[in-house]
Image (spheres, grey):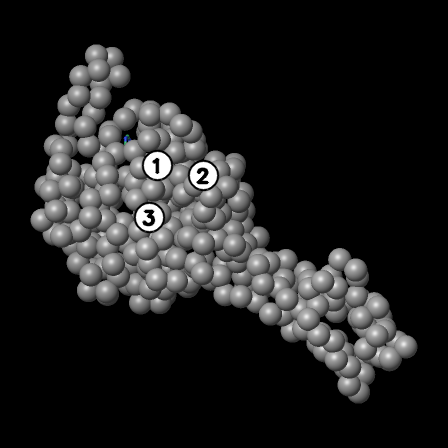
Amino acid sequence: MSSVASVEAAIPAELSGLVRSVRVADGVATIVADASGLGRSAATQLQKELEQAVAKVPGIAEVRVALMVDKPKRRIVAVGSGKGGVGKSTLTANLAVALARMGRKVGVVDADIYGPSQVMLLDPARGRPRAEGNTLIPVESEFGVKLLSMAQLVEPGKAIAWRGPMVGQALTQMMEADWGEADTLLVDLPPGTGDVQLTMLQKFKPAGAVIVTTPQDLALIDATRAIDLFAQSNIPVVGIVENMAGYVCPHCGESSDPFGAGGGEGAAVSLGYPFLGRVPLAMGIRVASDTGQPPAANDGADGAAFTAIAARLAEWLDKQPA
Ligand SMILES: Nc1ncnc2c1ncn2[C@@H]1O[C@H](COP(=O)(O)OP(=O)(O)OP(=O)(O)O)[C@@H](O)[C@H]1O
């Protein structure tokens, strides 16, 4: 048998369909295999299995495996707000779950170092991300969304008082993790306009940004600042979401507007950005969120607003150039 034939015969049958070429010269076997569509860990596994199988072939001193991989078309969408507590994390988690229910492969990066809440929202079982070499493997939440959070990387309850460079490094590790097939990465940014935002904009160039605000004037002024940050970096603003708008009393059914109403929509119109929708202030949203059950995971009324906003985001994503 020729040395190429011996190498081919040694490759397990279930992997041979992925092998594109085999060459042998001076005891060195060079195998090219197609790993496109496999996640990074499956590709590493393929490489190992090929190396191990071929190393056993008599006369082969060295095995080199080259993998053909396609760069996944993954879009990053930053979710930002001018100030804290406006529901940015709640929106991010629910958009992710709603997009996953629409068939997208979604990852969430919780970059909100000052209040990382995605673990509570999406993974109350608190899975720990694994690491392969320097590459993090995100946790799979029960809602079909992959997750990496600053909260998984530090001890629970420890004050997060990191300096800028550490924050940038942690963000980079999360962004460059093995996101596998994920086509959309939603990044829950800290409120305001600090180091994380700048690293995000300069290094990872999101395809777009969703801005969350509550309807009252102060939040809107802050939201305008957040919008400016994206606009200055030429990151398109997908649109503005108005959260905590309109409270329906669960007892009497009367609707009131504790934070005013329509401010987000008004700001969107006057600034010339699309208005993506309004999420009511609802007890059900708060309770479900606190117990790790994002309303968008179900067909109930509390999830409907998130699903509608996710549909607008999906439509926007589909219109972006490949
Ligand atoms: N539409 C809503 N109805 C009721 N409660 C809400 C709504 N949106 C958010 N909340 C609640 O408000 C609180 C703050 O929300 P969230 O953590 O999402 O805000 P945030 O903007 O991400 O804040 P931070 O930047 O401080 O992390 C949470 O307890 C959340 O459950």
Q: In the visual, does 26 lie left or right of 193? A: right
Q: Nearer the viewer, residue 181 or 317?
A: 317
Residue 215 position, x and y percent, is: 15, 38
Rendering quarter of residue 89:
top left
Q: Tags 2 and 1 in contact by the CB under 8 Å rule?
A: yes
Q: Which amino acid type is marked by label 2?
A: Arg
Q: Which amino acid type is marked by label 3?
A: Glu
Q: Nearer the viewer, residue 304 or 52?
A: 304
Report the residue at 79% width, 66% height from top.
11
Label 1 packing within 10 angstroms: few (<14), some (14-19), many (20+) = many
Considering the numbered disc 2 on the image, is that residue within a helix, a strand or a loop?
Answer: helix
Label 3 packing within 10 angstroms: few (<14), some (14-19), many (20+) = few
Q: In the visual, does 189 lie left or right of 226? A: right
Q: How many marks?
A: 3
Tell which tag, 2 or 3, sits nearer the viewer.
Answer: 3
* Depicted 223 relative to depicted 71: above or below: above
Q: Which amino acid type is marked by label 1?
A: Thr
Marker disc for residue 307: 1
Report the residue at 45% width, 61% height from top.
73
Between discs 2 and 3, the one toward the N terminus: 2
Q: CA distance from mark 2 to mark 3?
A: 15 Å
Residue 42 position, x and y percent, is: 63, 58
Query: Which residue position holds label 3?
Result: 315
